[in-house]
């Protein structure tokens, strides 16, 4: 069981519904049970309505509201944040703002960031569409242009004070970043999505199908699951081979192995050992138990 939170941030012209298939796979997976899923919503309409009493929020508006959202939903618990498209730029703007304001220690609970198809270097494909539709006046579309100075400044801060940070302080906080491009994405190229981030790869799919986790050949969910399990751990059931070589331990037993605590639970119905630790340490502990049994 994973005691952590997953926050999903959608992109341009989108909504939390874009995460439906990913969220369904996460919530149905037994290895991820206990993981709480939250979808951050912000306004991203196609066009601003003339004479409306509201306006389209820009990146800074959305990014600064993310602080209150995280405080209200995850409240300092271990958290992973996954973004799609423009959502990655908003997250970077949020992180840069937090660090510039001296709130770096509040970010310590963020244990993983995974960005999908983020236009880190802008999007050439939509330039003509933005021009024809008058998106130069769209508060969010402006930062989707190639070589946006504000986007570049935020990324520089994130790389220097998050990705390559050494500690947690008011001005820096190390958070692992995993960055993925869509293999057939024509909206955000691989060069733009991967940018200069160190842990960057490519997943099958275009800009939108990369989120179609219900498809059998989609690798986004298995990849996300792998990172979540690596980050937060899990308690898989390990079947003990042999003729009952391992006797039932006490229902809940904590052992110290190489300076790390190992919580072990015996399942009498399936004759398995559930553990909370790394597989190597748990298997080492099991082997020691087997070696201690007297020969018959």
Image (cartoon, grey):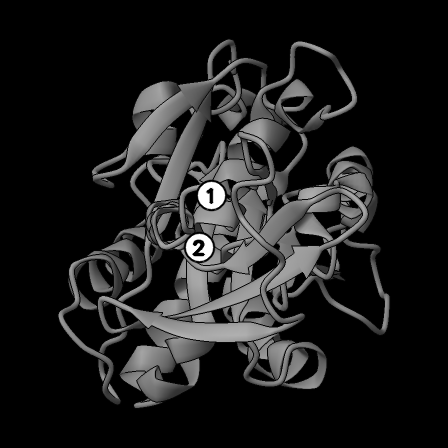
Instruction: State the residue at coordinates (39%, 69%).
Output: 95
- Quadrant containing the N terminus in the rendered view: bottom right
Q: Distance between the Cα atoms at labels 1 and 2?
A: 6 Å
Point out which mark residue 254 bears.
none
Tell me the crowding category of disc 2: few under 14, some 14 to 19, or many 20 or more residues within 10 angstroms, Cα based: some
> Residue 69: percent from the left, percent from the top?
67, 77
Instruction: State the residue at coordinates (42%, 38%).
Output: 145
For label 2, the residue is 231
Q: Does dot 2 land on a helix, a strand or a loop?
A: helix
**Residue at the limit of the structure toward the front, as seen here:** 296
> Residue 123: percent from the left, percent from the top?
44, 29
Left or right relative to 100: residue 276: right
296 and 4: which is toward the camera = 296
For label 1, the residue is 227
Total marks placed: 2
**Quick check: 222 above or below 29?**
above
158 and 38: which is toward the camera = 38
**Quick check: 264 above or below 218?**
below
Tell me the crowding category of disc 1: few under 14, some 14 to 19, or many 20 or more residues within 10 angstroms, Cα based: some
Instruction: State the residue at coordinates (62%, 85%).
Output: 75
**Quick check: 108 above or below 16?**
below
Q: Are marks 1 and 2 in contact (CB under 8 Å)?
A: yes
Q: Quadrant of residue 85?
A: top right
255 and 154: which is toward the camera = 255
Inspect this view and state whether residue 177 appears: yes
> Residue 56: percent from the left, percent from the top?
70, 61
> Residue 46: percent from the left, percent from the top?
76, 42
Q: Does dot 1 land on a helix, a strand or a loop?
A: helix
Instruction: State the residue at coordinates (84%, 55%).
Output: 49
Inspect this view and state whether residue 10 appears: no
Left or right relative to 22: residue 258: left
């Amino acid at each position: 069981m994973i005691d952590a939170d997953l926050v999903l941030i959608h992109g341009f012209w989108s909504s939390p519904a874009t995460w439906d298939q990913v969220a369904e796979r996460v919530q149905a997976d037994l290895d991820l049970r206990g993981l709480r899923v939250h979808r951050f919503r912000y306004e991203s309409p196609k066009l601003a309505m003339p004479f409306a009493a509201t306006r389209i929020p820009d990146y800074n508006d959305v990014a600064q509201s993310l602080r209150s959202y995280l405080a209200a939903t995850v409240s300092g618990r271990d958290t992973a944040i996954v973004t799609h498209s423009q959502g990655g730029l908003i997250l970077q703007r949020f992180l840069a703002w937090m660090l510039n304001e001296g709130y770096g220690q509040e970010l310590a609970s963020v244990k993983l960031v995974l960005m999908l198809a983020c236009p880190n270097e802008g999007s050439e494909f939509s330039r003509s569409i933005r021009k024809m539709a008058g998106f130069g006046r769209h508060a969010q579309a402006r930062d989707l242009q190639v070589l946006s100075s504000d986007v570049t400044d935020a990324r520089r801060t994130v790389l220097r004070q998050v990705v390559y940070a050494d500690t947690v302080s008011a001005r820096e906080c190390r958070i692992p970043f995993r960055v993925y491009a869509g293999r057939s994405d024509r909206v955000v190229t691989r060069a733009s999505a991967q940018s200069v981030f160190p842990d960057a790869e490519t997943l099958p799919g275009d800009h939108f199908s990369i989120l179609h986790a219900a498809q059998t050949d989609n690798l986004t969910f298995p990849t996300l699951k792998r990172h979540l399990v690596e980050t937060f751990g899990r308690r898989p059931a390990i079947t003990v081979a042999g003729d009952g070589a391992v006797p039932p331990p006490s229902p809940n037993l904590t052992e110290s192995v190489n300076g790390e605590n190992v919580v072990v639970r015996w399942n009498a119905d399936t004759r398995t050992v559930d553990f909370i630790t790394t597989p190597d340490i748990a298997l080492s502990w099991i082997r020691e138990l087997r070696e201690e049994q007297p020969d018959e």
